[in-house]
């Protein structure tokens, strides 16, 4: 039975596909290549020994989706495709609602029309907004404060409503914390276009000499060393969480939102130090003002994932910084 993977050539989707193929799952990869490269397919093949089946398609084109569902025996969907830059979502919100919400509605409609009932969706800890308490449990109220977070929250609500309306559906929204790291082979990794917004790809680009120094956004937060604290999770652990979620969907109906995080946080400077120590590379940095919209600290309560999915993180911060650097140092220009 085939698992359709949307956004399959992106950072997280590609690592999931490797994990799925290595466990003998049958995956059909879909992406519009807007934020990824066809070279990812070669990397997946090199790592797994399997040539992946790939379709270039856009979720905003419903007729294309209908066609794909009618000619393939799709049993479930893992839905990664979408835009993910918080700042861009504030300057161009409609583009985000069109892709992340309208594109996802197309997918849900086609699933309903074609009687495909199982879905795993990439949500985000950003749906919680300002922490009322830490760590966030799944019951923490949702109050996203940027359009990107709104799109994730809206898709979650649509999934929950759809499951309520029709008891055949089983759907899981996985709320990711901060995915970093790369496949340990150094053949797959994160390859952002332009100057990275996120911390880890910025660090690796400083390490490789492409950027001069890291700007640390604020050192006056109420945290261990004044810098922001996040729950970093290795992308291979994250990928495995999706495999477990598919197993869960095979045996359960209804909707669940589940945190995927390590359950503890590291500060910006702790991450920088781990990177330097493990990789023996110096990361020059300067303290900059706080970045607008940033929260001081949050991390996951990951007990629901353990209880429902039988999943916990296996890899450490040292694994994350080692694998991120293995990828970037072997591929200074990413997939190009
Ligand atoms: P990514 O940009 O690397 O991957 C997304 C992929 O989706 C890209 O390959 C892109 O070309 C494709 N895509 C975008 N719109 C499409 C469309 N309309 N039709 C078909 N393909 C389309 O991002 P990622 O880091 O791999 O993130 C995957 C998912 O996880 C996203 O939904 C993102 O919002 C979510 N997420 C990511 C993070 C993170 O830190 N990376 C954290 C929380 C949630
Ligand atoms: N950060 C930083 N410099 C950067 C990018 C990020 O100091 O160039 C900090 C940011 O303020 C936050 C943490 O690193 O405390 C993680 O930020 P990222 O953008 O990776 O993820 P977020 O949690 O914001 O989604």
Image (cartoon, helix red, strand yellow):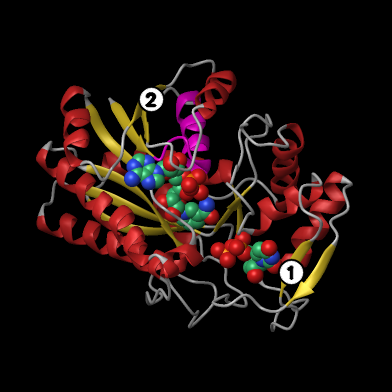
Q: Which residue is mark 1?
A: 216
Q: Position of residue 206 (x, y in %)?
A: 78, 52
Mark toward the start of the polypeptide (2 vs 1):
2
What secondary structure predominates along the stretch shown in magenta? helix
Q: Is residue 13 above or below residue 67?
A: below
Q: Quadrant of residue 246?
A: top left
Q: Position of residue 180 (x, y in %)?
A: 62, 50
Q: Residues within 10 Å of mark 1 (few under 14, many from 20)?
A: some
Q: Secondary structure at mark 2?
A: strand
Q: What residue is rendered at 57% in x and 72% in y?
A: 298
Q: Which residue is mark 2?
A: 54
Q: Quadrant of residue 89?
A: bottom left
Residue 12 on the magenta span: yes
Res. 257 mark: none
Q: Which residues are magenta?
A: 7-22
Q: Is residue 108 above or below residue 137?
A: above
Is label 1's Cβ within 8 Å of ligand 2? yes
Q: CA distance from mark 2 to mark 1?
A: 39 Å
């Amino acid at each position: 039975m085939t698992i359709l993977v949307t956004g399959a050539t992106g950072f997280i989707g590609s690592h999931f596909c490797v994990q799925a193929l290595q466990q003998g799952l049958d995956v059909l990869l879909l992406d519009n290549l807007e934020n990824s490269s066809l070279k990812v397919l070669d990397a997946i093949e090199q790592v797994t020994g399997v040539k992946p089946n790939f379709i270039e398609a856009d979720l905003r084109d419903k007729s294309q989706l209908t066609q794909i569902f009618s000619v393939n025996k799709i049993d479930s969907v893992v839905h990664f495709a979408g835009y993910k830059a918080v700042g861009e979502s504030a300057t161009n919100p409609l583009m985000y609602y069109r892709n992340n919400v309208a594109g996802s509605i197309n997918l849900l409609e086609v699933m309903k029309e074609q009687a495909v009932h199982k879905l795993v969706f990439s949500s985000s800890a950003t749906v919680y907004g300002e922490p009322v308490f830490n760590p966030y449990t799944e019951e923490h109220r949702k109050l996203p404060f940027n359009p990107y977070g709104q799109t994730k929250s809206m898709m979650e609500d649509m999934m929950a409503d759809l499951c309520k309306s029709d008891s055949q559906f089983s759907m899981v929204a996985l709320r990711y914390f901060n995915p970093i790291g790369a496949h340990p082979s150094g053949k797959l990794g994160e390859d952002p276009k332009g100057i990275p917004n996120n911390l880890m790809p910025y660090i690796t680009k400083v390490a490789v000499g492409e950027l001069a120094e890291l700007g640390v956004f604020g050192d006056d937060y109420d945290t261990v060393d004044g810098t922001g604290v996040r729950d970093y999770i290795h992308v291979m652990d994250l990928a495995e969480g999706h495999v477990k979620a598919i197993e869960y969907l095979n045996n359960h109906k209804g909707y669940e939102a589940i945190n995927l995080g390590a359950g503890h946080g590291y500060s910006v400077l702790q991450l920088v130090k781990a990177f330097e120590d493990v990789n023996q590379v110096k990361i020059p940095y300067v303290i900059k003002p706080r970045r607008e919209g940033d929260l001081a600290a949050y991390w996951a309560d990951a007990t629901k994932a353990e209880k429902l999915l039988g999943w916990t993180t296996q890899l450490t911060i040292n694994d994350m910084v080692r694998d991120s650097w293995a990828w970037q140092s072997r591929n200074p220009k990413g997939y190009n």
